[in-house]
Image: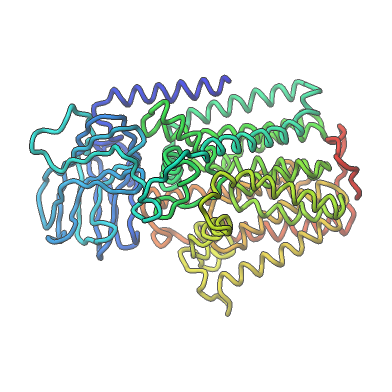
Amino acid sequence: MALVCVLGALVFYNSIAIAAEKNLAVNGDLSRGSKNIPYQWFGTAHSRKLTDFGWQRGELKMTNRSPNYASWHQILMLRPGWYRLSAMVRTEGVRDDGPGATIAVKAVGGERLASNALHGTSDWSAVTLYLHVAKWGETSELLLQLGDDGDFETGSVSYRQVEVEQIHGPPAGAAPVYELGQPVVASTPAAATPPTGFDYQRPLGVICGTMLIVMLTICLGTIWRPAISRPSAPLIAGVLVMVVIATVEFALLYRFEGYFWDIWQKTNRALLAVKLGPRDIYNPGLPVDSYPPGSLYLLWLSGWLGRVIRPSATGFRVLVESPPVVASMLLGLTLLFAARRESSGWRAFAIMSMFAFNPALVFDTVVWGQSDSVVALAMLAAAILILHGRWRLGWIAAAIALLVKPQAIAIVPPLGIWTLINAGLGETVTCAAISGATMLVGILPFIVGHPPNWIIEVYRTLGSRFTDASVGAFNLHALLGGLETPDSVKVALVSYYALGMSAIAGSFVIVAFLVWRARSANTVMLATFIAMLALFVFAPRMHERYTYYPLVFLAPLALESRVLTASYAVLTATSFFNLYFMKYLSDSSSFFSNHAHWPVGLASALNLALFIVVTGYALFRLATHREPRATGAAPIPAEQPAVT
């Protein structure tokens, strides 16, 4: 409750403060920034290698060396009313018959509303548009653009004095003037005709979302209960530390604007979710990627809260980023309470602290603004429950994780084999059915109106969005030169894709062997960590953020031996560097070719070496019968006796 009050106060205060400002464009005078990165502005292009972006105090620049569409972006949320958007612009070598240089607003449905354009070579001149917003949440971005998506431009453009000002109305004869009152959905036949009849899928979505939250709460309560029933000083201290850390992280969300593209995608999905509801959120033609349904429930809630509070762009971003902060706090508490069952209180506190103060994990949630903690919470709950014999609850949690992000698939083979060996075929089939029913609950509000294979296509499309061998991950492919390289390119006579998938297959054979021979839950937990690390190190099209899950699973094991402690430290270091490096590249609109390659190669080699070392350590421990035995409090009461 205290955290909710703090968050509400911060959002409300920020909204009032922004509303009091005359210029609603953040850093509109372009005076704030560091090095070559302007504060709250993000440069991107249709082909980023064809455009040079620049910033000096008071001025933004873009140069298209070849025909291209380029723009500076800023998230923009406007309350109902009239607005004047303007900027001073200078152009050089821009086509006379092209779309030119403009300032524009992007509507939530993807429509761009542009000002008058400047062409050719011109001195500083004003570009202006007038906009009427009928409802909060109709706008999503402020754009300073050169060209258009369907009509590329060449030349250079500079911007100064970007202003978004609320007015009483446009002056007589002003142009262009735009109205944003009706829902802007998508310019496709499927979305052009508004649906008729009662939208029963909205209340159904509320019911199903509530059911998923209740199920996950039951899973967490089952894990927490044994430790909570025996309160002690370390537990109380751990709870207080996690609450304080979460409060600080909430406050820091205002300081760090996040990775722009991910933040814009999430805020826009949140706006579309509350505007369209489950019935139409997966319509073709919408300007956002189609993520699995589980990720939409919390975004839908954030969008609804935004409609009620009507915050500024920063306030709404904080609303959207808040659930991962809460999930991070719950992750720390789950590690604390789970470790307390099998070790001393202060050792459990140390395990929790290794997670809570991990710089890579904090960077992912607070600085980058990602939601990996939500998925990791369900994944960790699934592993703990399954490894303590609560098969059915564990597979409910696993299904929830899969509903949010497909990366959770890494826990299915090791935990599935463990369930089959210890619970038997009949219970395994029952768990599979319960897991499938849980996933059906999650997708039910969205599936009406779509073909039977719709959900499969959602996951397939998500996996095919990128085609690079490494999409920013410092792994085997990055080590071999696969950054910004299609995974169809061959290396050592095979493509990056074939090499990666073959390595994953071999890794999962080793994981299956470890689980088959395991005599303790700790070994299965280590095998699950190896499976997730293998996915990061070998899978093609991997992003930089997905060391989050291996770090979470290694935290409760890190104090078992020096090897695992050192492994945790190394993975933390490489993860932090990977995240920091990739965010800097994006914020500065630069590329790998603009920077030294050896740090990337070193981090990639360390991650590959780490996989080899930990896998060898796990096999050696099995061969020498040096598996650690759980000690301390009794485990969670099992649904059926575990047979090992």
Q: Could you tell whether 385 is left or right of 287 in the image?
A: right
Q: Could you tell whether 489 is left or right of 212 in the image?
A: left
Q: Residue furthest front?
A: 197
Which quadrant of the structure image shows residue 46?
bottom left
Q: How many marks?
A: 0
x 56%, y 44%: residue:
445
Q: Choose between 562 and 365: the one closer to the eye.
A: 365
Q: Could you tell whether 273 is left or right of 609 in the image?
A: left
Residue 425 locus on image (x, y percent): 85, 55
Q: Residue furthest left?
A: 173
Q: Choose between 24 and 461: the one closer to the eye.
A: 461
Q: Residue furthest bottom?
A: 493
Colour convention of the picture: rainbow
Residue 497 appears in view: yes
Residue 481 locus on image (x, y percent): 51, 67
Q: Choose between 425 and 581: the one closer to the eye.
A: 425
Residue 474 appears in view: no
Which quadrant, please, contains the N terminus? top right
Residue 130 locus on image (x, y percent): 19, 38
x 81%, y 58%: residue:
514
x 54%, y 47%: residue:
446
x 30%, y 48%: residue:
111
Q: Could you tell whether 640 is left or right of 5 in the image?
A: right
Residue 367 locus on image (x, y percent): 48, 39
